[in-house]
Image (cartoon, rainbow, N blue to C red):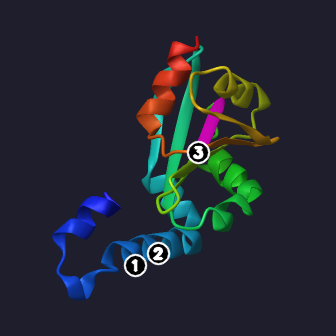
Amino acid sequence: MRDWLATKIVPEHTNLPQRMFEHKTNYASAHLKEALALDAKDDIQFSDMNTVMYQIETVNSELFLARKEEIFSLSNKLHPGRQHKLTIIQVITHGTTFILSDNPALLQKLASTKLPGNITDQDIFSLHNVVMRKGIIKALKDAE
């Protein structure tokens, strides 16, 4: 979307897409609970378990990866009845995706999918490209 938008703006606004995503990053960081709640998809079923996925688009993954324990806590408060909880952090400017989960079995399941990534931390699955939520859902369902 950033690249498409860059083709539609006049030269004096060349940095507009970058500034928009920087603003979105800063807003999500300052209002993390609201950002998670607004972009939650909580009607996902796989492995006979209720799943919720949150998605954050950012230009700075470190702002959110450093707060993963807070993200886990907020996720548990926002959707306490979900057995599976994933937070997808997409770094728009670098084309990477991080998936956070405090469920090790779920991360192992992600590692067994066709997604081109690996577990880089005990709570993080890392991909070297942007993968949308629906692609992650499909990969998990295909791995069942």
Local secondary structure at mark 2: helix
User: How far apart are the two marked residues, 2 and 1, measured between alpha carbons?
Assistant: 5 Å
Q: Amino acid at mark 2?
A: Glu
- Pointers 2 and 1 in contact (C-beta within 8 Å): yes
Which residue is identified by label 3? Answer: 128
Q: Residue furthest right?
A: 122
Is 29 inside the magenta-drawn segment? no
Local secondary structure at mark 3: loop
Residue at x 44%, y 77% (from the top left corner): 23
User: How far apart are the two marked residues, 2 and 3, measured between alpha carbons?
Assistant: 21 Å
How packed mark 1 is, by other alpha carbons closer than 10 Å (few <14, some 14-19, many 20 or more), is few
Residue 2 visible within the image: yes
Where is residue 68, by image quadrant?
A: bottom right
Local secondary structure at mark 1: helix
How packed mark 2 is, by other alpha carbons closer than 10 Å (few <14, some 14-19, many 20 or more), is some
Rendering coords of residue 107 (x, y %): 71, 31
Q: Amino acid at mark 1?
A: Arg
Rendering coords of residue 93 (x, y %): 48, 63
Which residue is identified by label 1? Answer: 19
Mark drawn on residue 22: 2
